Structures are given as C-alpha cells and as structure tokens.
Image (spheres, rainbow, N blue to C red):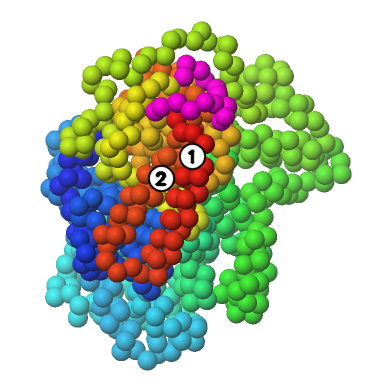
Amino acid sequence: MIPQGFIQDLLSRADIVDVVGRAVPLKKAGINYKGLCPFHGEKSPSFVVSPSRQTYHCFGCGVHGNAVGFLMEHGGLGFVEAVKDLAGELGLTVPDDDRDPRERERAAQAREKQLSLVDVLAKACRHYRGQLKGSRRAIDYLKGRGLTGEIAARFGLGYAPAGWHGLASAFGEYDDPKLVESGLVILQDEAGEQRRYDRFRDRIMFPIRNPKGEVIGFGGRVLDKGEPKYLNSPETPVFLKGRELYGLFEARAAIRQRGFILITEGYMDVVALAQLGVGNAVATLGTACTADHVAKLLRFAEHLVFSFDGDAAGRRAAARAMEAVLPHVGDTRSFRFLFLPAEHDPDTFIREHGTEAFEQCIAEAVPLSRQLRAIAAEGCDLTTPEGRTRMLAQARPLFELIPEGLLKTQLLDELARDGGVSFEVLERHWSAVGRPGHGPARAAGEPTARRQEPARAETDRAPAPPPHWDDIPPDDRAPQAESAAQDPLGYDPRDDGTPAHRRFERGHGRPFRRDREGERERGRWRDRRGGDATASPRSTPPRTASLLDQIAWTLACGLAAWETLPAEMHDQLVQQPVPHGALFSRLEQLLHDEGALPPEELLPLLRTEAEEAGTGALLARMERLLALGSLPAAGDLPVLIDRLRLEQIADEWNLLLESGPLSDDARARAAELNALRAALKSRLSGGAV
C-alpha cells in the first residue's frame, strides 16, 4: 500500500501547471491558467488550472481533480500507476516497492528501454506524416474514403513509401537495433549475411497510441490490391495486441460526452466514424476482444457496444467478445451487441442510411442477457425437452462466468423459462451438481444467486451508548487547517484526492469543496442504524471527519439507506474524488450484490481492495469509529449531502471569480450555481443537522 503521507508529499512537490501543460496549452488568466478542456469539445476556454489549489476544473463538463487525477483521467491510468508515473517524473521512489534491488534495477532498465522505443516510434510517426504530404496518390486515396485533412491530422495518419529503406532518410543510423526492436525494420539472415529492410512499404500508416498518447506501434493498409490488406507492428516491449485498442486516445472526449464506447473491427471503421460524427469508436488490433481489452475499456466507460458484421464470422466474433465480458458483468454496467447487415460495415451503413439510422441501430443493440440466451440456444430445438435440456447445458458454462448479483439472478430466471422449468428447479439442479469456482455444492433449496436482502434489523445487536465526539482519542481529532495537508490520515480541506471514473452525463462533474470556519458545531450521531428523514434537527459533529467522511460512515452503518436517496444524490456521491467517490461506487455495487451488510462485515471486505482504490486512510478513520461504537442516523444523509453541495458551490464560485473574463460556458455555469444555491438553501431552511 502506498503511504498516504507519500502521496501528500508527492502532490506538494508536483506543479499541476506543468503536469497539465504538457497536454493542454495554457494561458495566464488572473491568478490561474486557462485552456480548452481536453475532456470535451469546446471553442472558448473554460478549463481552469489553479496553482494555489493545485487542482484543475472545467466549468463546461465539470471534470475536476489534482495532478494524479489528471494522469488518471487523461492518460487512462490506474491510481497506483498514476502515482508511480508522477513520482518517476519528479525523481522519487514510491516507498511500497519492496522488491529485490536487482529486480528493481531490471525493472528500471526495462522502463528505460520502453521510453527509448517510444521515442523511435514517435520519430517514425513524424516521418510518415511528412511523407503523406508529398504523396498525391496517398492523399487521393484518403479523400476517396471520405476523409478530410483535419481527421487525418487528428489520428496522425501517414504514408510509408514503396522503397525498401525509406526510414534510412529519417534515422541517421539505419542499423540501430532499436529500429528492429520497435518493429519498424525487419532483420533477416541470408546466406550468412544480414539484410535489413522496412516492414511497412507503400501503405497508409495508422499510428497506434496508448491512453497516454504515446505511439507504441503502427497499422499499415495497402492502397491498392495486395496482401495482407492490413499489416500490424509485431509485439514489442511497448506493444501487446491483446491489450491495446486503436483510437482509444483520440476517442476519450467523445466517450465522456456520449457515455459509452463503440467497439468496431478495423482502423478504417474508427477513422471513418469519427469523420461522420461518431467519435466514441475504438477497434481491436486484428485479434478477438480479450478480457484485458474489456478491463481497459471499463476504465473509461461502463457501457460498451460491440459492432459486428451480421454474417457467420461476425457472430462468432460476438461470441468470443461475450465470453471476454462475462466476468466483468455488474449491476451498473451494460454490454450490448450490434449486428449490421452482412453487406455493410459502420462506414458504408452511415453513408447509405445516415447517422440517425446508425444511432437507432445502437439504441436497438442486443443486450448481453439476450445474446447469451441466443448463443446457448444455437442448434437447439426448444420445442422439445431434449432441445431445451441441451440449451441449458450450453448456457451453464457461460452463466457461471458472471459474478453474483441481481443480473445473474434475473438471467437464471429467464433461462429457466426458456428451458421449461421453474427458477427453483433449475437453481436446485445446478447447485446439486456443484458449481466450479464457487465452492462446494449447496444444500437443495439454498439460493445460489442471492436476491435483495433486507437491511438487518436494529434488534440484531445490542445498542452501545454513543460516544461524544469529545471522547474520540486525540489523534483522531480534526487537524487544524494549516497542518491538514501534512497529516497522512487526516482530512485535507483542500480536496486533493484523485477523481473517480464514473461520469456519463454532461454537468455531473466533481466541483470543489472547502472546509469553512464557523461550522464546527458540537453534537452526537444517534446510536441507531436507521432513522427517517423527518427526524428533529441536530447539530453536526466537529470536523473530526469531513462531511464526506460523515456521509461514508452513515452509509457504511446503514447501507440500505442508499436506496432512499434520489438519483442526483447518487451521482453526486459516486463522482467525488478518491477516496470517497471510489468508496461510494463500491458501496452501491456491494448493496446490489450482497445486500445491506453490517459495518463489521463491510469494512474488512473494503479493506482487501483499499490499495488499488486508494481508500486506505478513509477506511482507517471509519474503523476507528467502529471501534468506538459510534452509529449515525440514516435520516441525516440528505441534509449532509445538501450541505456538502453548498460547500462545493461556494468553492466553485470562488474559482470563477479568480479566473478572469468568463467564457460562455462559465457564465452559464454561474447562473446554474445561483439557482442551485437558492434551491438548496430553501430545502435546508426547514432544519439542518
């Protein structure tokens, strides 16, 4: 686990203007910097970087975070990977690395080699782009495919001339081993003599970028007839076909706006769709969709649509893709399958029928549950008992790849209906046979996929008298504002957490928050798990924990209260920075999968996932509260969330005032903030905790 103190030190050393400025051109605006938001399309800059707060914020789409958060969001990195990347840039060593020194040295050498290969590939990309400008034949080919110069530049398209040693003009040393290691040059031994020549010749070149925008390989397409039509870079230390996706770097902004990713079968599909206004498409690199592909895509969106040809080959590819996604199924995720007519790919379909018709096809794409049932029923006559039994036998291996949850329960019910048996009979039969990977067989009649469990009754435990907040040990008290940032386990009112990854609708960003003086009132949280929303007003506890900590603890002690909150409060919570946003998202998933677990079971479960999620310090604070027997009231939740929103609105207003002249988006946001503030104050006027 990366110590929280190291993360705080890392953020204090990093300059967010430098981190963001490497990807976004920034200009001085008041005491802050402004630029065009890299996460959504805009013409007037509304993306603000604050050196004093060390945060970034967009008034157009609401995205917000710190230096680590920017690397996660812009580069598609996980939390630990982003911390290590930023530490490497600053020459720091992450203290969780307990590997043997020789192993660390080998890892450092491998990383250095990767960086050198990326430099070589970037230089080759510039060379190919320059060659495209001088080839009328290649330009005419792209124009014939309906592509403009703007789209070609956006995707970095280039041209590899027909000569055998075209790269010799770009690299002074054509015999440099890195040209072979990067896959650009082929080395052959012929009669004891080594021969070198370019891998890509007379082809349109498609640079393949990783989520950070680095060129890691190429795909080349012939201009005329020839084989192979598409030629990819070989696998190298920086390029693994089974993990990378074409167009993901270019599609990030459109993915955020649209809320889903369209997975296609080829480079030209991605580029042509972008030309036609569908910018959220990516493609696998000549391989079937793998579990690694799916895991990477789910870091950018929780809704995936796979597009395949409607022929037999397309349906076989869909079956392989479905097997890859089944282990990732969750109650908040969706996977759908789009089958176009056999004579069309996405590009030709849109050109013939229009974008609206294609969007309608996406809306009508087959959901995963229906696709699974269709695959299970292939070759089965469902009008006979034998056919139905065979269908169930074919469905079971696929069904068992799905994690436990409500979707799995509903799918079992549908399979039972398709198979002509009751839910209970099928559940009992599959349980009796035993389910690989899910432990020993259960007793007959015991449910395998748990249905929604009711919240545990208050009488299940003997209530303990609630401790006064003054009784919490001294090291649990709220740090003072000037020392909060140095306390590795304390609440930092400057909000330097990294952002979560659930943002599907414009305007559902993560505004800032701050800790305002004058609100440190003394009080108690009630000693009960429940509580209605009309409970009499109480003063809040002092800032031993932030409002977000209080909300997290309230939910952990009565998880069923989540379902009483309106959808906009769900959105507000899961879109908070790490650690809180990640925790709220996980609590929602656990409620659906496991029911309302008590805190004694819930916190140890969350602890096992704390390192990757970055929630360790927050869980430590919650565990100390559990040890004290402090049980909050669920009825406090809506008021706590409204107060949190008011604090965020106030801080966002301050940022607007600090950032010079306002863009149209910023002025619209100011009006929206005024309306929100008035509505919240009106709602809270009846009483607040």
Residue found farthest to the front: 685
The reply to whether the magenta stretch includes residue 103 is no
Q: Looking at numbered disc 2 in the image, what kind of residue is underneath it?
A: Leu
CB under 8 Å between discs 1 and 2: yes
Q: Is residue 337 visible?
A: yes
Which residue is at 35% across, 38% downward? 579
Residue located beneath label 2 in the image: 646
* 627 or 306: nearer the viewer: 627
Please report the residue visible at 48 percent of the width from the left and 28 percent of the height from the top.
Answer: 537
Label 1, label 2: how far apart the Cα atoms are: 10 Å
Residue 179 lies in quadrant = bottom left
518 or 112: nearer the viewer: 518
Task: Residue lying at the far top in this picture: please name it.
Answer: 462
Residue 639 position in % (x across, y down): 48, 35
In this rendering, position of residue 312 left or right of residue 54: right
Q: Does the image show residue 201?
A: no
Nearest to the observer: residue 224 or residue 303: 303
Give residue 459's position: percent from left, percent from top: 58, 11
Quadrant of the rendered structure where residue 244 is?
bottom left
Q: Which mark is on residue 684?
A: 1
Residue 408 is marked as none
Q: Which residues are magenta?
A: 526-540
Point 33% across, 63% down: residue:
47
* Residue lying at 34% horizontally and 28% vertically, measured from the top left: 521
Tag 1: amino acid: Leu
- Give the quarter of the figure containing the C terminus: top left
